[in-house]
Image: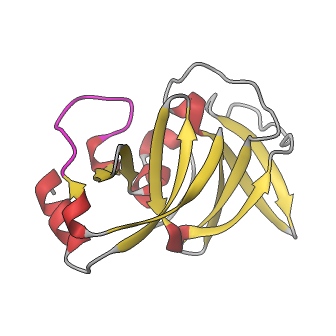
Amino acid sequence: MCAMEKLNNMTATGAREYLTFRLDREEYGIDILKVQEIRGYESPTRIANAPHFIKGVVNLRGTIVPIVDMRLRFNCEQAQYDTFTVVIVLNLRQRIVGIVVDSVSDVMELAPENMRPAPDVDSVIGSESVIGLGSLGDRMLILLDIEKLMSAEDMGLTVDLA
């Protein structure tokens, strides 16, 4: 599916809400309906032979949750873990995954006229995982299809999204 088709599918339903978060100097948005909760960062238990961006797992009320450091996944400079560092716990079709981000900004509602197709450029994030770009005022968000991103083969997660 090309970027324009993805954007048309996204905007056909009208305004959507996105949880916005920061990684390094960039701001990203993910569908708020995929977010289960936001937690402070705690050191996970490391898993041998996992990809370098999978920090390990945590026990979240009896569920073992893999933790993905998005800074490492997107090849950002490794930032320090501080009081702003959070884990966004995602519910992706009954699979729970946590992503580590620098900080959570807010929930932003984007109307179709505030969304643009993503440019067709090679990047660390596969083009199939970028829905488009959202803008509101002077803010520019990279809108991610977090389900596709977390199910990408190079993630090493066994997320069955079929």
Residue 162 seen by the camera: no
- The part of the image, by quadrant, that contains residue 77 is top right
- The part of the image, by quadrant, that contains residue 159 is bottom right
- Quadrant where the C terminus is found in the figure: bottom left
Q: Nearer the viewer, residue 137 or 92?
A: 137
Q: Residue at x 26, y 80 (%)?
A: 13
Residue 11 seen by the camera: yes
- Describe residue 160's horizontal placement relative to residue 61 as left or right: left
The residue at the far front in this view is 137
Q: Residue at x 32, y 40 (%)?
A: 126
Is residue 119 found inside the magenta-colored segment of the image? yes
Q: Nearer the viewer, residue 20 or 87?
A: 20
Q: Relative to 90, does residue 15 appear above or below in the rendering? A: below
Q: Residue at x 59, y 51 (%)?
A: 105
Q: Residue at x 86, y 59 (%)?
A: 59
Q: Nearer the viewer, residue 66 or 76?
A: 76
Q: Relative to 78, does residue 5 appear above or below in the rendering? A: below
- Name the spot of residue 136 as percent of width and height, x first: 34, 54
- Quadrant where the N terminus is found in the figure: bottom left
- Name the spot of residue 68 as percent of width and height, x first: 64, 43
- Describe residue 75's horizontal placement relative to residue 145 as left or right: right
- Name the spot of residue 22 as percent of width and height, x first: 55, 41
**Range of residues picked out in magenta:** 117-126
Is residue 33 found inside the magenta-colored segment of the image? no
